[in-house]
Structure formats: C-alpha cells, structure tokens
Amino acid sequence: MAFNNVGPLTFLAPGQTAFWSYTYGADHGTQFASADVKAPNQGAVHMADQQRKRKDNNGNATYFVNIHNQGVGGCFHNLQGGGMS
C-alpha cells in the first residue's frame, strides 16, 4: 500500500533533521518512508534513514524514520512511501 502527502508539512533548513513516526492498528509488514518534497525548493536534498519498527502487544505497529536535509537551502516536506514487495 503506497502513500503520499502524509502528515503535517515540515520545513527543514540545511543541516536540520525531522523525526517521524506513523502507526497502524495492525502490522503492515516492512514499510519504507521518505520525504515527499514540496515546491518551491530552495536547494534542499532530503535523505531518509534509520527506518525502524515497533510492534506492540495489542498488535499496533509503529514505524519510524529520520529525514535529513543535506542540501544548500530549505523546503517543506511530509511523508511518502509504502510496503516492500
């Protein structure tokens, strides 16, 4: 299941990092999330890393990702991604 434009718009200046999490009421298997970069872009390059998952005893699965701006300028982003196949 793919997703785009999820979560609040978040601005990252050069060198900043955003820490994201998203939860499902069930385990959705392996998920990958990256930055859904928005325009205008002032030279930002967003990198996603530290993909993580927690599964609770009640069956909820929470996924985590860090987004870093490695570019020379800033821009807004939220999340896009989905399951691996």
Image: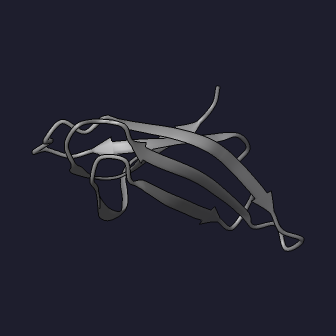
Look at 15% across and 41% down and name the residue there.
41
Left or right: 82 with respect to 85?
A: left
Depth order, front residue of 40/13: 13
Q: Position of residue 15 (x, y in %)?
A: 37, 47
The one of 52 and 23 positioned closer to us in this rendering: 52
Q: Is residue 41 left or right of residue 12?
A: left
Residue 1 appears in view: no
Q: Is residue 40 in sight in this rendering?
A: yes
The colour scheme used here is one colour
Most extreme residue toward the right is 57
In the foreground, 53 or 16? 16
Q: Quadrant of the N terminus?
A: top right
Give the total number of marks visible in the rendering.
0
As drawn, which residue projects farthest toward the bottom?
58
Position of residue 79 measured from the top left corner of the image (x, y, whole percent)? 41, 50
Residue pictured at 46% horizontal, 41% vertical: 34
* Placement of 72 over or under 23, stated as above or below: above
Asked which quadrant contains residue 78, the reply is bottom left
Give the quadrant of residue 9: bottom left
Question: Is residue 42 shown left or right of residue 76?
Answer: left
Q: Nearer the viewer, residue 17 or 21?
A: 17
Quadrant of the image containing the C terminus: top right
Vertical side of 82 occupied by 65: above or below: below
